[in-house]
Image (spheres, helix red, strand yellow):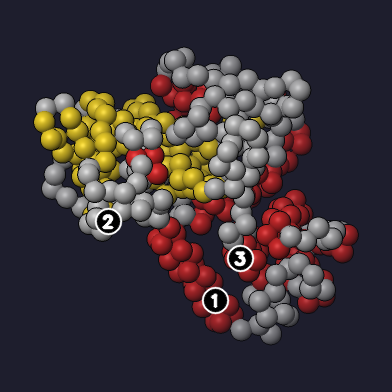
Amino acid sequence: MPHYGRYDSTQTKKSKEKKERAKAKSNKGNIEQTDNQFIIKGTNETTGTVVETRYNEATILYEGELITARLKKGINAVCNQTVFPGDIVVINQEQPGEYYISNLIKRKNVLSRTKKDSTRNNPNAGSSHNVATNVDVAVIVVSAKTPPLHPKFIDRYLMLLQDNNIDCAICLNKADLKTEEDEKILDIYRKIKIPVIETSTIKNTGIEELKDILRGKQAIFVGHSGVGKSSLTNALMDTDEIKTSHVSEKSGKGRHTTTSSKYYIWDKNSSIIDTPGIRSLDISNFKPNEIKEYFSEFEDWEGRCKYSNCLHYREPVEGCMVKQAVKAGIISRERYESYIRILRDVINDRSMNYDEVR
């Protein structure tokens, strides 16, 4: 009989470890500076919010107006590698109209990703990029068609968001094109308590429900190019000024229209960060034994496995309670197979099949 007290203790430890990892990442960037007092916990001075960054300057929402500011002297880094949309910064003036960023308020979280794309437009393929900070909720935007719904992409983003302690929701855009198969995929996430919103910017449906989730929060849209992130931002702001992208007929993938993360205010205390689309997500920085922590449906079963630190991978079905739960239909087979795909990517193993749990 399993020792449930020990199991509970293990889960508590895992939760603490995840929070500690997220905290360690929250102020990690590409800052190479001599002034170690640049990041501060708080201030009585007037602060601004970073809206957009460029190589050597940033656009800041400061005292109700948009200003352009540079980093203060002595920081050995470029602006777009030091501050990011969502950052809260302290602004000072050397002379009227010339602003500089004197301090960065300590972040509560940071969302970063590694681009695996190796196209000629991506000379930095494989490098890590911070895209937004201080995020209250992230919306993973997917579409019913053009491009089609890919659950494996959702699962990878859920891992990244949970790793950074960011609340998340899924938005199926172009919901008027939804199929029965799409509905089955969405039900998987509803069952594990992930909010799912269905929208159509063409038919103007689901937008009010989306607003209810985002109101009063600093939010971010993430997802492939062409799924409609910018169209949703237009709908929130009741405008058509933000550029939207189209899907290539040849590849079925979206073209990049948003080239850098941008910050928009659509209601009182309500903002959205629209990020560039990305064709693939790299999760190779996760350790194999960490990945299962991000599949919440495993938690009630893995503490009962016969094997110490069971990966639910190559262990025999007879001794792995997670595999038995999949075989019995209690755990979604699609989610389990997604877990295996992610695990195989991390350990570079292509030999696994799923026959033993069918």
User: What mark, if any, has residue 10 been given in the picture?
Assistant: 1
Mark 3 vs mark 1: give the one in front. Answer: 3
Of the two numbered discs 1 and 2 on the same chain, state the one appearing first in sequence.
1
As drawn, 287 above or below 66: below
**Residue type marked 3:** Lys
| Residue at image coords 51%, 78% | 9
Q: Residue furthest left?
A: 95
Mark 3 lies on residue: 287
What residue would you read off at disc 2? 34
Q: In the image, 222: left or right of 270? A: right
Inter-mark Cα distance, 1 to 2: 41 Å
Residue 31 image point, x, y percent: 36, 51
Crowd rating for badge 2 (residues with CA inside 10 Å; few <14, some 14–19, many 20+) = few
**Which of 130 and 99 lies nearest the eye of the viewer?**
99
Checking the image for residue 210, the label placed there is none
Q: CA distance from mark 3 to mark 1?
A: 17 Å
Determine whether the residue tagged by mark 2 lies in a helix, strand or loop: loop
Circle 3 Cα neighbour tier, 10 Å, few/some/many (<14 / 14–19 / ≥20): few
Residue 337, located in which quarter of the rendered image?
A: bottom right
Residue 321 vs 81, above or below: the answer is below
| Earlier-in-chain disc, 3 versus 1 | 1
